[in-house]
Amino acid sequence: MAIATRITRIDRLTAVLAVPLLAALLLSVLSYRPNRIAPPEPRSLADVFDGGTVSAIIASAVLLTIVLLVQHRPAVRAAIVGLAVIIHVVLLGWGAQILMEGSAPAARVSPGTGFWLGFGALVLLLLDAIARLQPSIRARAALLVGTVAALAFVLRSGLLADLSLAAEYRGRSDAFHRATLDHLTLAFGSFLAALIIGLPAGVLIQRRRRLRDPVLNLLTLIQTIPSMALFGVLIVPLAWVAANIPGAASAGIRGIGMAPALIALFLYSLLPIVANTVAGIDAVPHNATEAATGMGMTGAEQLRMVELPLAMPVILAGGRIVLVQNIGLATVGALIGSGGFGTFIFQGIGQTATDLILLGVLPTVALAFLASAIMDLMIAMFRGQSQ
Amino acid sequence: MTMLRWILLLAITGGLLFAPNLLEPMLRPLAPAGGPVLYNRATLSSLTGAHLMLVVMAMVPSTIIGLTLAVLVSRPAGAEFLPLSRTIANIGQTFPPVAVLALSVPLLGFGSLPTILALFLYGLLPIFENTLAGLRGVPGAVALSARAVGMTPGQVLAQVELPIAMPLILEGIRISTVIALSTATIGSTVAARSLGEVIIAGLTSNNLAFIVQGGVLTGCIAVLIYDLFGLLIAFAKHRAGIETGDQL
Amino acid sequence: MIAFEALTKSYDGRNVVDNVTASFATGTITAVVGTSGSGKTTLLRMINRLIEPTTGCVQINGRDVSELPEVALRRSIGYVIQGYGLFPHWTAARNIGVVPRLLGWRTSEIEARTAELLRLLQLDPAQIGPRYPHQLSGGQAQRIGVARALAARPDVLLMDEPFGALDPVIRRQAQRDLSEIQHQLGTTIILVTHDMNEALRLGNAIAVMRDGRFEQFAPPSEIVCAPATPFVAELVGEEGRALRLLSLTPVGPHLRTGEAPGDPVADTASLSDALSEMIWTGRDRLPVADRSGRRLGVIERADILSAGRRAAPV
């Protein structure tokens, strides 16, 4: 022990991640197809770049690994790895451009195994460095804004315009914007509705002990039902409403489409919001509510000024669960015609077109990640902690 | 109340699986005129079997690996990997299960294999996270006592930490299993055999009777399995010396 | 005998235990007193190797503990901590039997030993044995913790704030019980506490610890009469010093021959008990009797008062 602390300690995580990081250099970094449906052909670093560039890339990767093995300060690690991620993405765009220059316009270039492996290893190293840095709320917010801005810049700059994914997007930009709108409507519309109903419901059953178990049991039961089953079964009553209630059909209510998906997502959202409202208010320290009663607050004042503010982090945690869950589940809505990013995913599965699947998956994941990061920040702000 | 719920669930599940003809009159109004009322391309019981098989094939390795990983990072030797593994578990769960499923297709093609891979990968996270929470929830004084009475590290884990963490571990397996049951339904879009097939068939042929059969059956099975885990968890809580009644 | 030799533990270059050399006699209670962060818990845990020293060593009966297999060492030493750390998933009886079970005793032996210990601690084996920790009162849980530590008949018992979680009435009873058991079994006990009164009440010797060092290591009367440093003096407290000293001294050595009327006091009672009795009943001298009721002599008020007077400066 004593000796180990005196000699330079080797970072074990880097030692493990060095394997994929360096192996990535030997694998296919890009894959090339003469046209959209042709089988992919692997392209190694040497196939894409000239000798000097290849040597420079390999040398920097080895250097990066060595530095990370011995450098322990999280801030330095985060800066170095952050830079490496940016270079990695730039190289992807540059490589795609080189491959496309000598090819027919119908040719397609996608990131290969090597790119994903290296990218994955770098992102893990970056996440680890940030986790160990334990940034303050301000720093986290800045980091989030910076990442979103960098991403937007890369997408707008045309750096990645030669990738197959970008080609898929260009062919469907109208459909993509429509899907974005539908997806946001599904995820946030149901969230808002659940908030409007769930918050008062949570407060109510927190106060009426007898209602608590039946309501929470019912909501748990709903959460347990597989999404496709709930989406499907809701079609039945809605189809009946559309056929039998005058004006319903013209208001956009149909058996399939947006309506059953919105209702299903709303139902799924209720449990986290109601249960967390109850748990949050339950967890308010007894002496705080007693002091509030003691100084003559009415029940409503006590709720507004004491209980809800103190319960807010827990309620927001429920909101985070709902948003992440809804953004993911909204993809399933595509199966019943609700639109959203799921449309591309299921089309892509049908055509075995990876790029089309990614066109649906990447924005969904990015949206879920963004929502959860923002909610995490809000929770941290409400807790008043600086971690 | 609980009894009634069990009877109702078992009756509906049993009816759909073994005596679908009894339910035909109720479903007939939902089927298109002249179209089939009962799903006829496969028996519901064989699809249920295939569906559950997908879940079991994924959940067994998920449990073994998720549990092992959580134990490893909670040991002093794995402490260096703890912050990152928690971040991954946290971020990984923002990944929608459908996305994991869709991305398994380019890797493994169509069929059961990509579905099992997706269920397995997604199932790891809740099991890992809950096992970790369970192990970290062992009171410090208890863990210290276990060492102080002279237990070996293996004895501390097997005799003290795991039994005390068991309710939370089972809770994690329950969450994973419920998600897996749901994602397995969607697996039928990548040609895995599951009950989702019935719902998809209903959607494509505009046959509400199919949708109701498939939807109600999957829903009932999911709730039954959820309740079954509930019993298991209550038992584990009792064994872990946790007072039941005021919890849950 | 337990001995520390230049025992040091440092974390990040800071010495939590700083070069402590001391030895504790077999069959006595040593109380280690200090404020939180003084290093007393670290010191205790180095004895059963829950913490390994940075330098120096701990010896038990002349053997360096670092040469003993740590699991075997811990099974041979009893350990009681604040909060007791009872295993919540095991019954009280199974908790008590854990070390014998680890040592591979036969089931019948374990059961007999468990019942014996429960009775020793005045608990009904049939009633308390099958209960789970969450079904025990604080006092019962504390006694189960002590019973568990004693189960394999250890020669050494380490106690870290063992009474800290008890309310005052139960605490006094638990302290009396511990003295009683220690007399009966002759176990060597090292007890860590932040409560000087507890240390004075229980310890045959007291080590006052501050910043990882022993400020003073002496019998209780010396700690009260001649505190070595201002810190020790502050821990003992200025007020009531005389009465505290009297409470540490038994009546026995101050006997005079003679007789006096009224109820006798026991020869094991403290001088402060005797004085209190005098004030209460308005007497100047009390008869003294031993446990069997035999009259031994009398105790005079003037003798008590002079026993409590500060020793003349040397």
Image: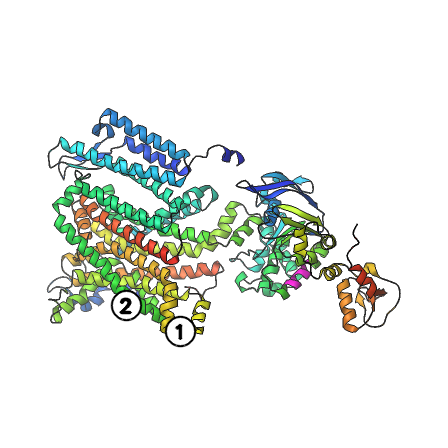
Q: Nearer the viewer, mark 2 or mark 1?
A: 1
Looking at the rendering, which quadrant does residue B22 occupy?
bottom left
Q: CA distance from mark 2 to mark 1?
A: 25 Å
Residue situated in front as seen by the camera: A116 or A288: A288
SS class, disc 1: loop
Magenta span includes C154 = no
Q: Residue at x 77, y 66 (%)?
A: C275
Q: Is residue C269 visible?
A: no
Q: Which is the main secondary structure of the residues drawn in magenta?
A: helix
Residue A45 % position (x, y): 24, 30
Residue situated in front as seen by the camera: A149 or C248: A149
Chain for disc number 2: A
Residue A349 % position (x, y): 19, 47
Amino acid marked by disc 1? Met
Q: Which residue is mark 2?
A: A197
Mark 1 Cα within 10 Å, few/some/many (few <14, many 20+)?
A: some
First of labels 2, 1 by sequence position: 2
Residue B216 % position (x, y): 25, 63
Coloured how? Answer: rainbow
SS class, disc 2: helix
Q: Which residues are drawn in magenta?
A: C171-178
Tell me: B38 left or right of B76: left
Residue A161 % position (x, y): 17, 39
Q: Which residue is mark 1?
A: A297
Residue situated in front as seen by the camera: B191 or A85: A85
